[in-house]
Each structure stands twice: as structure tokens, then as C-alpha cells.
Image: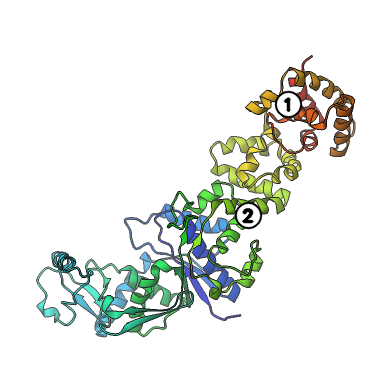
Amino acid sequence: MTAGVVTRFAPSPTGFLHIGGARTALFNWLYAKHTGGKMLLRIEDTDRARSTDEAVEAIKDGLTWLGLDWDGDVISQFDRAERHREIAEQLVADGKAYYCYATPEELTQMREEQRAAKKPPRYDGRWRDRDPSEAPEGVKPSIRIKAPQTGETLVADAVQGDVRFPNADLDDLVILRSDGTPTYMLAVVVDDHDMGVTDIIRGDDHLTNAARQQIIYDALGWPIPKMAHIPLIHGPDGAKLSKRHGALGAEAYRAMGFLPEALRNYLARLGWSHGDDEIMSTEDMISWFQVSDINKGAARFDIQKLEALNGHYIREANDIFLVDSIEQLLPYLEGGEDLSKSLFGQNKERLVAAMPGLKNRAKTLLQLIESTYYIHASRPLNFDDKAGSILDGDARALLVDAHTALSAVDDWTVEALDEAVRAFADSKELKLGKVAQPIRAALTGRATSPGVFDVLFVLGKQEALARISDQASN
């Protein structure tokens, strides 16, 4: 056990819990659990124009659904703005930062001149060594850090290795804006320090930020947390992950019928591995997780692989657990309230009994729900095209005799029904499929379903015979 490990997940509340953010949260959570440490949740809500309370709740809801809990209260970065300002002023007093009185017009002109000279746009340090007494009237200053101008900044990264940044490329960044609001760079450093964060696991799009933040840590004389910058997730074609690849929020995957256990397993395998293990329990992931095993290369998101893994979890799941999962999902679906009433009113026992036959065919809970139609359908049933084509004149005539044969079954069990239907097929000198197909269509309104004996059993004798009678004719 590594004592005292503190990780954090620090999303911006501008939308739902993105799938990439969910993986970052998972890696932080796994490492905290593996080391017996803590994972904290900080909402980086300093951008007031884009941050919303609804997004904060969506992030918390997404983490909770995924089973990723956090320690302590949720921390708002915006609420700590006074502390950030205090640190910025302290850096000025210590000679590690300075007031910059450059006007917006001056900064714009500076950037334009640099672009014209084909140079990267950077602040030229014009107020770095000037006395504030030279400040023009009416200009509110920002505060800039005094970055080193020679040498290099080394970021020792647990995933990327040693990454070196020439200090000439890292200009004196603003840490406090002229309106008194802190910048992201300062706020992150102060918050991570004050929260006691020991390990930062985040996307490698923050790697340059790490170098800039390291300059602030050094100026304050604070210890730098261990850094681990993980490659971003790409689509199956190798391009940056987008909505067409599956770059959706966690709530979308819940609405598509994925189990949180399956999504956790899949996300863990996106960029981290333990040998050839594909299917891993949460306990295994916690036991095995090491930051050093995170891959340097970008992982590729494949919705078909996720569906296949989800199908495995559905097949292995307890039947009552699956019924409960359906019940929890329905409120998030269009028309889910009405379906919930019919499925979980008088048909819940039927649904539990049907689950062994249903779950072997489904890759998502949505597919599982679609296959429950025969359980809650009201007579007369609606038939799909294939089922309708099966129920021709000959099939309907056959159902008359099938109804008679099944009416004679007293012990309404799967075994007894199997025996009775097979005996009926033999009496008609027909293959089992020729008898089972019209019975299935009459019972379910569909051409495909769980085994016909299971369907008969789940519906019960009275309902099953009534449905067959509806379609039988001489």
C-alpha cells in the first residue's frame, strides 16, 4: 500500500460527462483504490459564461452511475477565487511575478507584429522589469509570472517519460487577469496544492500546461505532484474521437442500454492493460492497476467491441439484477413510463421468468427491452412483417390442432411443453420447426424469440392458449 496518495478528477462543467473524461476519472479512481488513497472531485467552473449547474449535476450523475465515488465534498474552483488572488499577490510581493499594464490594443499589435515576422505569438516581457510608477493612468494591470528565460523545464511524466520544454517557448503567462479573476493555470496549481493532491492523471493535451504549471510550483516553492499524461482516445479509424465514433456523454451510453460494469471494463482497457485479460471485474482492476502500465499510444474506441463486451455482462448477470436494471433505465427512454407500468405492474414475475431466454440474445438493455414485447403485449398482438407472413392459411389451420394439443397439458412446465409440442409435430408428420414457427408467431407477434417452450411457460397456460386461439382458424 502506498500511503497518502490523493488523486483528483477535475472536469469543466460545460456539458455531460464525456467518455474521455469518464476514462480519466476511472484511472484516477482505480489508482486511488489500488493504493488505499483518495480521489477528490473538483469542478473547474471559473469560466462562468460556459459553466452551468445542470452540467455539474450531469457530471456527478454520470460518475455515480459508473460507480465512481469520490472522497469528501465536491470542490468548486470558482469559490476559491479569493485564495487564488491572494497567491498571485504573494508572488508579486516575493518578486516572482509582476504587474503588467499592457493594454489590449498593445497586446493585439504585439501578436500581429510577431505573426508578420513569422514568429509564434508570445508576450514580449515589456513590463517584466519596469516600475509600476510608469503605469499609464486608468489601466488595470494583470499579474504575470516571471518565467525563466533560459534553459528548459523538465516534466517527469509517468507515462510519457521525461518531456523537455525550452523556457524560451514558455512566456510570462498571466496568472491574474486585469479584472481580478484568476487564470486556469494559477487556479489548478493552488487548488491541487491546497487539496493535497499527490498524483495528477489527465489527458496528454495538458502536457504543455504541465510545464507552465511547473513554473508556478517552482516560484511558490511547492512540491510538484507526480504527473501522468494519458493519450487521448481516438476513433477506430485513428482520427480524433468525435460524435460519429461515439464521443458521447455517459448518460448517452446509459440510454443506449449499456451496463456500467461493462463500460468500466471497456474504458479500463482503452489505454491500460493487464496481460491479455479482456474481461476484468472491478476488484481485479483495482488490484492490478498501475500507472506504469498505461500505454503511450492512443487507444481506439470501437462501439462494436463495447457492445460485445456488454453482451457478455448481460449473459452473465443475475436475472433479477437485469430486471432491476431495465426498471432503472426506462425513465430515461421515450415512452418509458408507459412501458414501465405494463412491465412492472402485472408482468414483473413473467419478466424475471423470461430473462434466461431473453438475455442470451441481447447485447444491450435496449435490445433486451425490445425482446420483452411478447410479455407485456395486449391482445390482439401487432405482428411484424415476417411473423405475418408465417401465419398463412395452412399455419392458422395448424394452430387449431395445436391449441387442442396444448389444452390437454396439465403440468405447464418447459419440459412438459417440450414433450407435448414434439409429440404434436410427430402426429402431423412435420419437423419441429414447422410447428414451432406458427406457434411462436402467434404467441409473440415476431418471427424470432426465445425458445417457444420458454415463451409458452412464461406466458402461462391461459394467456398462451388465448393468443393461439386468436390466430387459429379452420
Instruction: Identify the residue position indicated by label 2 in the image.
Output: 309
Label 2 crowd (10 A; few <14 / some 14-19 / many >=20): many
59 to 432, vertically: above or below: below
Q: Residue at x 56, y 55 (%)?
A: 65
Please say whether residue 36 is visible from this viewpoint: no
The reply to whether callout 1 and callout 2 are in contact (CB within 8 Å) is: no
Give the image quarter of residue 357: top right
Answer left or right for 338 relative to 399.
left
Expressed as whole percent of the image width and height from the top left, the position of residue 82 reads 32, 71
Residue 44 is labelled as: none
Dot 2 amino acid type: Leu
Q: Earlier in the sequence, mark 1 or mark 2?
A: 2
Task: Report helix, strand or loop for mark 1.
Answer: helix
Report how far apart the C-alphas of labels 1 and 2 lie in the structure: 33 Å
Q: Residue at x 67, y 39 (%)?
A: 344
Where is the C terminus found, in terms of image quarters?
A: top right
- State how many labels appear: 2
Expressed as whole percent of the image width and height from the top left, the position of residue 404 reads 86, 22
Instruction: Identify the residue position indicated by label 1 in the image.
Output: 442
Task: Report helix, strand or loop for mark 2.
Answer: helix
Expressed as whole percent of the image width and height from the top left, the position of residue 440 reads 74, 30
Q: Residue at x 39, y 55 (%)?
A: 14
